[in-house]
Amino acid sequence: MIDWGEQRRRQDPGFFCRLATQGAQQPVWIVSDARRCSDLLWFQTEYPSQTHCVRVQASEETRGERGWHFTAGEFILYYPVLYYYCYCLLF
């Protein structure tokens, strides 16, 4: 499934963004997991004046206090990925 998704993104970087926003009528969208540069670029291209990105980060200490712990080999990079979450606010 991951390979299929990555193949779709290579063919059409906006494929999943269009699916996620198709028919949306809400006045404000919060995209809480836009890790890929292609996702951010799609929103910035399709909605240039409405897209506002906010970088949210926490220290490893703070993340540890919230129950996060690093596990080697658990995360594989298949595509250029941002190393922080970027919330896209569209309004």
Image (cartoon, rainbow, N blue to C red):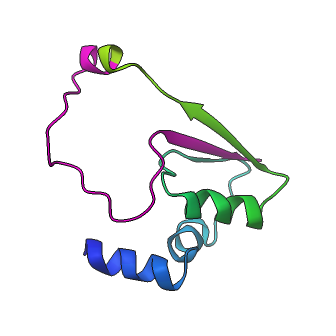
Task: Give the residues in magenta.
Answer: 63-91
For residue 77: magenta?
yes
Rendered position, 36 above or below 59: below
Instruction: Give the vertical position of 82 relative to 12 (above or below).
Output: above
Taking the spot 62% from the left edge, 56% from the top edge, the residue there is 40
Q: Tell whether 87 sits left or right of 4.
A: right
Residue at (66, 65) in percent of width and height: 42
Q: Determine which quarter of the picture holds residue 87.
A: top right
Number of numbered discs visible in the structure rendering:
0
Residue 60 in the image, given as x and y percentages of width and height = 32, 21
Q: Nearer the viewer, residue 76 or 56?
A: 76
76 magenta-colored: yes
Q: Magenta part mainly helix, strand or loop? A: loop
On the picture, is 80 further left or further right than 78?
A: right
Quadrant of the drawing holding the N terminus: bottom left
Q: Percent from the top left, x then y, of residue 37?
A: 56, 58
**Which residue is the extreme one toward the bottom?**
11
Please state if 88 lies on the left or on the right of 56 as rendered: right
